Image (tube, helix red, strand yellow):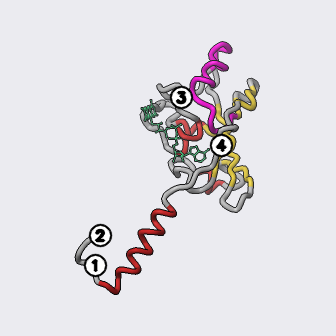
Amino acid sequence: MAWFVQPENLRLLLECEMWTKRAHHFEVDLSAFRNILDLDKDRMITTVEPLVNMSQISRLTVPMNLALAVIAELDDLTIGGHINGYGIEVSSHIYSLISDTVVAYEIILTDGQLVRATKDREYSDLFCASPWSQGTLGLIVAAKIKLPIK
Ligand SMILES: Cc1cc2nc3c(=O)[nH]c(=O)nc-3n(C[C@H](O)[C@H](O)[C@H](O)COP(=O)(O)OP(=O)(O)OC[C@H]3O[C@@H](n4cnc5c(N)ncnc54)[C@H](O)[C@@H]3O)c2cc1C
């Protein structure tokens, strides 16, 4: 602790430090959310849970001669982490970043409510704010991702 802190500010500083430590992070076990729920070849949309990783998607899509528009190099990067942690190393000059290929999210808000967020309709503000939010706005439990048309 800095020596120049005035005694009257000491209690406030200690409280702030304690609060910071308490608020630093919390963990929610999403380990069951690792399934590819659907691949609609007519609409070219796949619905995935957040812990689905790049390898899983490739194993499903490549035999069908399909692929995501944006795929990270590392097989174990997850869809949820890639969107909320904002993978920016891999992008497409046509489709942009992976979050730009998402058409809808299902998100659990901090009050426990499950909502669907889309770009132009319900919860569009949440939809736009979710990428790079590091999980601060809610937990993504599913994402609908548009595959490029062949
Ligand atoms: C070695 C290495 C190589 C990399 N290579 C690439 C690359 O090739 N291309 C590229 O684009 N990026 C790359 N990255 C960056 C990478 O995309 C990001 O670090 C990404 O966030 C990591 O994803 P993850 O699955 O490990 O997520 P995590 O690190 O587990 O999560 C990232 C963030 O998202 C939050 N989050 C995760 N899941 C959810 C959820 N369901 N709901 C709400 N919040 C959630 C977490 O709380 C955390 O804040 C690389 C990073 C590393 C360390």
Residue 42 image offset from top left, x and y in percent: 76, 25
Do the CB atoms of the residues marked 4 and 1 lie less than 8 Å apart? Answer: no
In the picture of the structure, the residue carrying the numbered disc 2 is 1
Residue 18 image offset from top left, x and y in percent: 45, 69
Do the CB atoms of the residues marked 2 and 1 lie less than 8 Å apart? Answer: yes
In the picture of the structure, the residue carrying the numbered disc 3 is 76
Label 2: how many residues lie within 10 Å, few (<14), some (14-19) or many (20+)? few
Q: Secondary structure at mark 1?
A: loop
Q: Which callout, 3 or 4, points at the residue further toward the start of the chain?
A: 4
Single out the residue that lies furthest toward the left: 4
Answer left or right for 115 relative to 148: right
Q: Is mark 4 within 8 Å of ligand 1?
A: yes
Q: Secondary structure at mark 2?
A: loop
For the point 31% across and 84% down, which residue is it?
7
Q: Is residue 1 above or below residue 147?
A: below
**How far separated are the C-alphas under marks 3 and 1?**
46 Å
Q: Is mark 3 within 8 Å of ligand 1?
A: yes
Single out the residue that lies furthest toward the bottom: 8
Q: Which callout, 3 or 1, points at the residue further toward the start of the chain?
A: 1
Q: Based on the displayed image, in which of its 4 quarters is residue 104 positioned?
A: top right
Residue 146 inside the magenta-drawn segment: no
In the picture of the structure, the residue carrying the numbered disc 4 is 30
Give the label, 4 or 2, closer to the camera: 2
Label 3: how many residues lie within 10 Å, few (<14), some (14-19) or many (20+)? few
Do the CB atoms of the residues marked 3 and 1 lie less than 8 Å apart? Answer: no
Do the CB atoms of the residues marked 3 and 4 lie less than 8 Å apart? Answer: no
Q: Is residue 20 above or below residue 14?
A: above
In the picture of the structure, the residue carrying the numbered disc 1 is 5
Total residue callouts: 4
